[in-house]
Each structure stands twice: as C-alpha cells, then as structure tokens.
Image (spheres, helix red, strand yellow):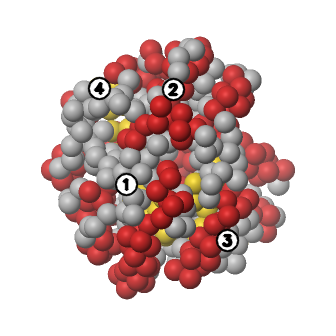
C-alpha cells in the first residue's frame, strides 16, 4: 500500500511557486480544502470544460495556458480520480516532472472513504441492490453523530492529508436526521464533504443546506413519472422536481458556494429527455452530467461470471442498459493486466464495519474490520492486501467491470451552467 504524505512534505515541494489544481470537480474541491488546512495558498483551478468560470471563489483556467508558464513558476496537483496518467503525461510534455513539479490526487490522498451514514434507502431501484437483491443486512441502521465524530477524528489522525469524505454509499443520507450535524462537524475540521440524494423524500432540506456541504449530487433517471419510476422504484417524480427547485433556492440563500450537479443515468428508455433535464439544470443553476447506467452490486456480477443466473429484478434492470453486462464483462476480462479502479476506495458502513470494496453489497469476506474504531488503519490496509474477495474478483476478470462504463455517455451532458 502507498505511503501517506504529510503537510510539510507538500509545502516543501511547492516552495514559492503558484499552486493550481487540475480539475474543478469534487476531488478538486477536496484538495483545495486540504491545502487550506495546511496553510498552502491556492491560486486557481485548471479545467478544459469549466475554464472562464469560477469554482469555490477562484478562477478556472485552460490547462495549457497555465502549463505554458513553466515549472519554475507553477506547481500542479492533478485532482482527477480517473485518467490521471493521461493528464500526467500532458504535464510532462511541458517539462513538468512528477514529485518535483506536480503531484496526483493519489499522491496527496491515496485512499478514498465512503461513509454510509444511512443504512437505509427510501427507493428500490432495480439496478441497485436495494431493489434487485433479496440479500438483507439486519444491521442496517443510522450512524450517530457521536460515532461519526470518533470515526472522522480517527480518519484524520491516521490520514493527515485527508481532504474530503463522502457521506453516502448504498443508503440515502437525507434519511439520517443527524446529517446536518455531521456535515457541520466535517466542515469545521477543514474537510470537503459530499452528499448524494435521490431527493424523492420529504426531509429537512433547509438544515442540510445550512450546514454547507461542499458538493451535493442529485441522482436522476427520467423527466416524468413513467421514465423515473421505471428504474427508481417507489420514487415520485413530482416530489423530486419540487425538491430540486427547493434545493436551488436554498443553495442561493444559504450556501452559494455549494457545488450542485445532477447525474442523469442514461438508459434505453430515457434518452429522449436529455435536453429537458439539461434545460431544467440550466434554469436551476446546476451542473448537468450524464453517464451510462450500470448494474450493481458486484456480488451479482461475480456470481454471473461463475455461470449463475442473476436475480429476476436485476435481469429486468439489465434490459434497460445501454451497454449489456456481457459486453462489460468482456471488456473487463480483456484488461486484467490493469488494476481495479476502486482498489484504494473503502466503505465505512453505518454499523462502523470497514468494507474493502465499494461495489460489493452483502459479501461477508468484504468486511475488513467489524468496528473501524477498534482497528488501526495500518492493520486494515494489511488485511486489504490479503482480501479473499479481491482475489476471487480478479481471478474471474471482473475487477474492472465498472470501468467499462466510465466516460460512456458523458459527451451528452452539458458541462457548463
């Protein structure tokens, strides 16, 4: 496992050069927070899609414009979680050297943490285990604010340059009434905080926004009741729409720097509504993004690769996918020499269990520690290197199953407000 850097290491590398972060998304925001916490000044961001705008109050420039200023004047941190190597090679064409003139997100923060503050969800989506799996997890409950504070303090102590946390995984975070306190505590620690919601519920949205999360993502799969409820089972489109309008108003009033994007999952049945959702996002001041939907959890894909049939509801969801799971499995098995893109991502569940894979739902061998608070992170990393389910997944060649869907359909999204 990778060495964990400390603040003084980064400050020494940057020296007196101006610092730019390449990427103005969630990871860019999180690195900005980490730099602020260690007293390193950030000049701005670089982003080919968002240049000319401002992000978190700082200018966004064209990457080549900044790189052309040279490594004597500029230091770069690449914030992208994906396509890092391509961006690194581009830096090097301008004479920048890794670990001297630029660092990657993985250098700064090698591990990514999803904290599932809610063990429950209000929907039964058929491409998600909450709706397509009969597996139940009786421990599913709510993380308390007391446990959360202990958890976050331990994470920060063991990961000095921790820049952000994601307060969702399989659950709907807005179901946890203590979410605003968790967001506020995270912000007080100088960390970026991301949440994602289906917004198909009645909740105290004002208290959540008042706590000022850095990033708020809305998950959508349609623009009317018929389209939306096809995948988002038990959801109500009118309620989602009302909450999106409320979110826009509250953001403007209470947290104008909060970044909001709508992630529109592309399926065969909802392509005709892309322009309508894009226009809605423009009206509300949200970033609109699109991507091919895929089938979760990985438990199903592993069993499918072994020759077993997938559950009936998962099979129903499969019919709507723009890329069938057979094609994704084929692409994954053709790239087994590459690492799993989630190898450094972990989940801390609402019962405090620490889980190896972010895409596995109910596999007991995915649990590296029953209680994260009781096991040193160094020991957990050792267990992760010897995880049985990882070996099984790799042996079947499906450890890059989800990578087959990455960047598919993104060109249909409107990147600017």
Residue 412 visible? The answer is yes
Decide: is 216 above or below 379: below
The dot on residue 234 is 1
Q: Quadrant of residue 252?
A: bottom left
**SS at mark 1?**
loop
Which residue is rendered at x = 20% and y = 60% of the image?
A: 177
**SS at mark 3?**
helix
Decide: is 324 above or below 121: above
State the residue in front, 338 or 21. Answer: 338
The dot on residue 310 is 2
First of labels 1, 3 by sequence position = 1
The dot on residue 369 is 4
- In percent of width and height, residue 107 lies at 56, 42
In the visual, does 15 lie left or right of 206? Answer: right
Which residue is rendered at x = 39% and y = 58% of the image?
A: 235
Which residue is rendered at x = 38% and y = 38% of the image?
A: 347
**SS at mark 2?**
loop
Q: Quadrant of residue 301?
A: top right
Please, which residue is most extreme toward the front here?
226
First of labels 2, 3 by sequence position = 3
The dot on residue 275 is 3
Which residue is rendered at x = 61% and y = 40% of the image?
A: 319
- In percent of width and height, residue 208 lies at 30, 68
First of labels 3, 4 by sequence position = 3
The quadrant in which the C terminus is found is bottom right
Residue 111 visible? The answer is no
């Amino acid at each position: 496992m990778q060495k964990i850097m400390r603040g003084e290491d980064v400050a020494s590398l940057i020296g007196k050069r101006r610092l730019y972060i390449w990427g103005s998304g969630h990871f860019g925001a999180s690195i900005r927070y980490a730099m602020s916490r260690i007293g390193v000044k950030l000049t701005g961001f670089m982003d080919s899609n968002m240049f000319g705008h401002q992000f978190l109050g700082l200018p966004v420039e064209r990457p080549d414009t900044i790189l052309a200023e040279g490594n004597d004047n500029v230091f770069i941190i690449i914030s992208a979680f994906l396509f890092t190597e391509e961006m690194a090679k581009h830096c090097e064409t301008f004479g920048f050297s890794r670990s001297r003139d630029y660092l990657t997100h993985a250098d700064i923060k090698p591990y990514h943490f999803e904290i599932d503050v809610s063990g429950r969800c209000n929907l039964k989506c058929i491409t998600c285990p909450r709706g397509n799996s009969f597996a139940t997890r009786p421990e599913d409950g709510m993380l308390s604010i007391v446990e959360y504070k202990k958890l976050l303090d331990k994470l920060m102590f063991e990961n000095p340059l921790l820049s952000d946390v994601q307060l969702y995984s399989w659950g709907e975070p807005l179901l946890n009434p203590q979410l605003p306190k968790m967001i506020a505590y995270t912000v007080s620690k100088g960390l970026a905080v991301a949440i994602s919601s289906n917004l198909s519920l009645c909740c105290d949205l004002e208290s959540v926004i008042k706590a000022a999360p850095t990033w708020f993502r809305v998950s959508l799969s349609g623009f009317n009741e018929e389209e939306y409820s096809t995948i988002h089972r038990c959801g109500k489109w009118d309620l989602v729409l009302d909450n999106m309008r409320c979110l826009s108003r509250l953001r403007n009033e209470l947290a104008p720097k909060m970044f909001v994007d709508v992630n529109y999952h592309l399926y065969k049945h909802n392509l005709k509504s892309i322009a309508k959702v894009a226009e809605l996002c423009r009206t509300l001041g949200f970033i609109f993004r699109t991507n091919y939907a895929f089938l979760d959890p990985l438990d199903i894909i592993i069993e499918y690769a072994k020759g077993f049939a997938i559950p009936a509801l998962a099979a129903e969801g499969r019919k709507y996918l723009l890329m069938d799971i057979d094609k994704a499995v084929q692409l994954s098995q053709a790239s087994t020499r590459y690492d799993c893109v989630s190898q450094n991502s972990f989940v801390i569940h609402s019962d405090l269990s620490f889980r190896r894979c972010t895409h596995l739902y109910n596999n007991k061998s995915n649990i590296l520690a029953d209680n994260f608070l009781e096991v040193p992170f160094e020991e957990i990393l050792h267990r992760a290197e010897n995880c049985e389910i990882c070996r099984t997944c790799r042996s079947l060649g499906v450890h890059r199953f989800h990578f087959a869907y990455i960047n598919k359909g993104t060109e249909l999204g409107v990147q600017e407000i």
